[in-house]
Amino acid sequence: MTSPRSSAPAIAHLASLLGADCVRTDAAELAPLLIDQRNLYHGNAAALILPRSTAQVAAALAFCHQQRIGVVPQGGNTGYCGGATPDQSGTQVIMALGRLNRVRQIDPLNYSLTAEAGCVLAQVQRAAADADRFFPLHLGSEGSCQIGGNLSTNAGGTNVLRYGMMRDLVLGLEVVLADGRVLNSLTSLRKDNTGYDVKSLFLGAEGTLGIITAATLKLFPAVRSSATAFVAVAGVQAAVELLSRLRTRSGDRVSSFELIPRLAVDLTVQHVRSADPLPGRHDWYVLCELTSSRADETLETLLADVLADAHTAGLVQDAAIAQSGREADSFWFLRENIPRAQRLDGESLKHDISVPVAALPQFVQQATEWVNRQVPEGRLIAYGHVGDGNLHFNLNQAPLIAAQKFLARADDVRRAIDDLVYSFGGSFSAEHGIGQLKVEELERYASPVELDLMRAIKHALDPNGIMNPGKVLKVAP
């Protein structure tokens, strides 16, 4: 890497190479890009690069590779693990992709769309809808997160149960490698067995192997009917059994199935002024949604029948089926504002875990018992995508407990929960990635063979170590 004092000539050369408008050094402009979404990491940077094309990305990376200047790719900066924040040395540059924001092509008959990495997720959703198609990735940050970041973190969200992670939604990629070469694999083919699936290396790599500049994405038939319900269930086991019934009875039309504890409802009602969907208080709830591309589907009737049978079986205690789009939106408003309500309530210890769906009840029981015994200064909020086994197993600072006391044991709490997850054959990082936050966890839980393979790939594609240094993987200098 260049030293902070020797970086000025390099930055001047980048400005001459790309144009002054594409290289910024103003402290005020850089300031908001140096802090991550959760305010966990504060970095410094020698410059901000704002390329307007793939060719400019390639030119910048070729120079940075030659000069051994670290490059930190950044999209909407909505990540939870510090993956888009530079270190504090002031020698790295941030490359923000927001100007690469064109939807290059929509092919409705092929059910595909090609978008540049700087496109905001909501923009891609609208483009698909305008073509009478559906792009299913749905995130709370969809108004600001960018496709490049979604790809680089293999984003999940609330529709994974039916449509899969971001990796499952990709047909082809355009990627600029660390040395400036461009991998053009923007195919829209569903079948292509010509050698290694190279593009998959960059999905979930968090910009440590190259910079994704565009992607060809899968589209689906437009959603023409839906049914949404907020359901009080007898417990986590009842939620898992209800999910199975819904999938079977609906012909697998379940798009979302979200688990929500009572405390999460209380916090959103208190801090975000969300409406409480049901009159009574229950320990656990499920927000579920069925969708279909057929306008004549009577999904509300189907959902009501399944819930009635589940009530008779003792799985369901109460339920409200949305009678309008506005009511369905109010259910989702509650779910999507749980993270905000947690922030407004106080400090939080967050764990993005997954275990096999069938193991969720036992995991939640054992983890809850451990938290109640060992962390009396915290309140457990376990919620999330139970349909795919992913829970945000979070602890919030209890009332009258000082933040410093609550946070003092953060590392020990995280390790104990992650160890329990590992014992269930689960993952400590289900959908938020590794970033800076979870590098040590990856070293602890990944097998030596897996780590060796990852380091070999990193060295092969980024021999000078310029791509998002310090993220995901420990690499020898």
Image (tube, rainbow, N blue to C red):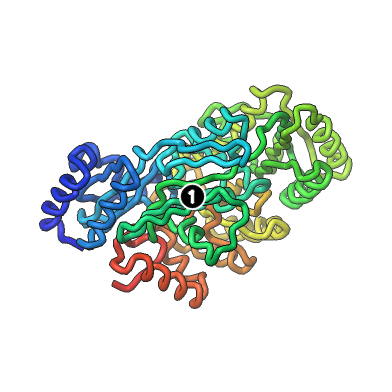
Residue 201 is left or right of residue 385, and the answer is: left
Q: Nearer the viewer, residue 444 or 289?
A: 289
Circle 1 sits in a helix, a strand or a loop, which is it?
loop
Quarter holding residue 128: top right
Query: Residue, x 81% and y 29% (percent of image)?
Result: 298
- Crowd rating for badge 1 (residues with CA inside 10 Å; few <14, some 14–19, many 20+): some
Quarter holding residue 177: bottom left
Query: Residue, x 20% and y 61% (percent of image)?
Result: 67
Residue 85 is left or right of residue 368, and the answer is: left
Give the answer, above or below, for where 257 lies relative to 179: above
Give the answer, above or below, for where 335 lies relative to 42: above
Three-letter amino acid code at disc 1? Leu
Quarter holding residue 146: top left
Residue 164 is left or right of residue 465, and the answer is: right
Query: Residue, x 58% and y 30% (percent of image)?
Result: 131
Residue 108 at x, y percent in the picture: 60, 36
Q: Can residue 378 be seen in this view?
A: no
Residue 410 at x, y percent in the picture: 44, 58
Quarter holding the C terminus?
bottom left
Give the answer, above or below, for where 329 lies relative to 464: above
Q: Nearer the viewer, residue 362 or 388?
A: 388
Quarter holding the N terminus?
bottom left
Task: Identify the residue position indicated by label 1 in the image.
Answer: 186
Residue 149 is left or right of residue 279, and the answer is: left
> How many marks are shown on the rendered structure?
1
Q: Nearer the viewer, residue 187 or 358?
A: 187
Residue 224 at x, y percent in the picture: 70, 29
Q: Can residue 309 be seen in this view?
A: yes
Residue 51 at x, y percent in the picture: 29, 43
